[in-house]
Each structure stands twice: as structure tokens, then as C-alpha cells.
Amino acid sequence: MTHALSWQSVHMHCPFCRNADSRVVDSRTADDGSSIRRRRECPACGKRFTTVETASLAVVKRNGVTEPFSRDKIVSGVRKACQGRPVSDDDLAVLAQKVEEAIRANGQAEINALDIGLAILPPLRELDEIAYLRFASVYQAFDTLEDFESAIARLREEDARGE
Ligand SMILES: [Zn+2]
């Protein structure tokens, strides 16, 4: 189920005349995708004002329960795959930020837990290919040795092409 983006808005009324209606003349999304700044014009008095809206992001778990998106959960989910690898806490924090940005860029208010796993794969691969393979084996449900072999072959091919 796809929900329209639910922006939590801070006062939409015109601050000059209290008119409830306004027209958006310009929208800018923050670099991290977590908020959007809108320039609005009041059709009643013609004055312009700015609103800043922040988006809520919910994760739908496999059992249907929703919970707020948490970078900490991304970090703890990935940490196990990084055991024994040269990956620092800072690396994991940056990875969690990239995952959140990628998810928010989709513009949806809700995301399935499984899709978060998929959003983790590209930045994790940039970080450490062994951790990536470990993590992918869980999220892409590798069942056999062939699954690992084809994933590794794909990595080699793409590395050879310089991707
Ligand atoms: Zn007004």
C-alpha cells in the first residue's frame, strides 16, 4: 500500500490576514531530504510567507506493525555483517544517513522493512564488499552457493568495468 507523502505542516494560515488558503510559489527540499521549505502567497492579501514542513517516515514491519524510521536500527542491522571488517562507527553512521536520504528521496511516508534492507545494499557495497555479501545473503535470500557465486561474479564484472 502506497501512502501519499504526509508532510507535517507548521501553520499554513497566512500570518498577515489569517486566511486559511495559500498558493505555493516555490518549494525547496533540504539537502538531507528531511524537510521542505515552501514559499507561499496568500490569495486574500497577496503577501508572501514561508513554511517549513518536516516529513514523517514510518517503517512497516513484516507483522504489519509500523514504527518510526530509526537510523540506529539501520546501524544495528548492518553491524553484524561488518564484524571483523574495517568498518568504523562513523562509517556506519554515514551509511545510515545515506539510507535515510535514499528512502526519503522516494517521497513516500511509509516503507516496508524489506525495502529498507534493499536500500542498505548500495551504500554498504561502497563501504565493504564482504559486509555487503553477508548482508545481501540475508536480504536477497541466498539459498545456495551458486547465489553467492553469481553475486561475487557480478561484483567482479562491475569492478572490472570500474563501476
Ligand atoms: Zn493574507
Image (cartoon, rainbow, N blue to C red):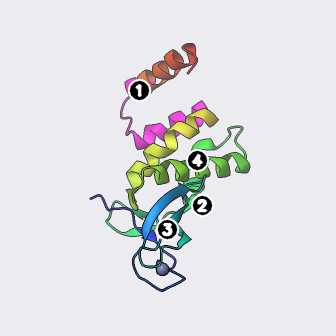
**Distance of label 1 from label 4 (alpha carbons):** 30 Å
Disc 3 target residue: 40
Which one is nearer the viewer's eye here, 51 or 70? 51
Residue 66, position as x, y percentages in the image: 39, 68
- Of mark 3 and mark 1, the one earlier in the sequence is 3
**Distance of label 2 from label 1 (alpha carbons):** 31 Å
Mark 4 neighbour density, 10 Å: few (under 14) some (14–19) many (20 or more): some
Question: Mark 1 or mark 4: which is in front?
Answer: 4
Q: Amino acid at mark 4?
A: Lys
Q: Amino acid at mark 2?
A: Asp
Left or right side of 87 for 46:
left
Which residues lie in the magenta part?
128-148
Disc 2 target residue: 72
Q: Amino acid at mark 1?
A: Leu
Q: Which mark is residue 59?
A: none
Q: Is residue 54 magenta?
A: no
- Of mark 3 and mark 4, the one earlier in the sequence is 3
Q: Is residue 27 above or below residue 82?
A: below
Mark 2 neighbour density, 10 Å: few (under 14) some (14–19) many (20 or more): few
- Of mark 3 and mark 2, the one earlier in the sequence is 3
Q: Residue furthest left?
A: 1
Q: Amino acid at mark 3?
A: Arg
Q: Which mark is residue 98?
A: 4
Tell me the element at label 1.
helix
Question: Mark 3 or mark 2: which is in front?
Answer: 3
Mark 3 neighbour density, 10 Å: few (under 14) some (14–19) many (20 or more): many
Which one is nearer the viewer's eye here, 28 or 56? 28
Q: Is residue 146 magenta?
A: yes
- Of mark 1 and mark 4, the one earlier in the sequence is 4
Identify the residue at horizontal 68%, vertical 38% (top origin): 85
